[in-house]
Amino acid sequence: MAAVSNLLIKKTQELLDSISNKNFDMYRQLCDATLTAFEPEACGHLIHGLKFHKHYFDHGDVRDHIFFQIQSCNLSSSFSVLFL
């Protein structure tokens, strides 16, 4: 479990770094192409895919560099099995 937790933390930091560095190619590698999200900029609309996110990499925040760092992490796993 520790190895999986460390991998998830590493990949999460890579995702944050890709956003901070405006590296859409890395962001695309780390995200599923069919992702969906409710983004504040979409005013409550469900966003499908990466096209919306690409727009913000190209035209979003004008700040040169934003630094993200994981401050606290709590990972847990659970699963349910349904027998029919």
Image (cartoon, rainbow, N blue to C red):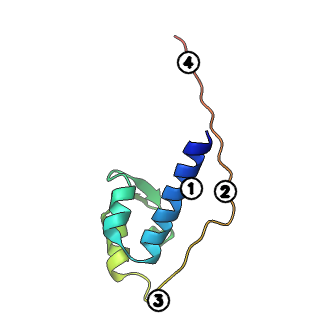
For mark 4, what is the residue? Answer: 82
Residue 48 location (% of width, % of height): 35, 56
Element type at mark 4: loop
> At 33% across and 61% down in the image, what residue appears?
28
Question: Considering only order in the chain, which callout, 2 or 3, is on the residue closer to the N terminus?
Answer: 3
Q: Is 63 located above or below residue 22 in the figure?
A: below
Disc 1 and disc 3: Cα gap in Å? 26 Å
Type of the residue with mark 3: Arg
Type of the residue with mark 2: Cys
Q: Is residue 16 visible?
A: yes
Disc 3 and disc 2: Cα gap in Å? 27 Å
For mark 3, what is the residue? Answer: 63
> At 35% across and 65% down in the image, what residue appears?
26
For mark 1, what is the residue? Answer: 9
Type of the residue with mark 4: Leu
Tell me if mark 3 has few (under 14), some (14-19) or many (20+) residues whose alpha carbon lies within 10 angstroms of its own: few
Disc 2 and disc 4: Cα gap in Å? 30 Å
Report if the CB atoms under discs 2 and 4 are less than 8 Å apart: no
Q: Indicate which disc residue 73 carries.
A: 2
Tell me if mark 1 has few (under 14), some (14-19) or many (20+) residues whose alpha carbon lies within 10 angstroms of its own: some
In the displayed structure image, the side of residue 58 where residue 84 appears, left or right: right
Q: Is 37 located above or below residue 2 in the figure?
A: below
Element type at mark 1: helix
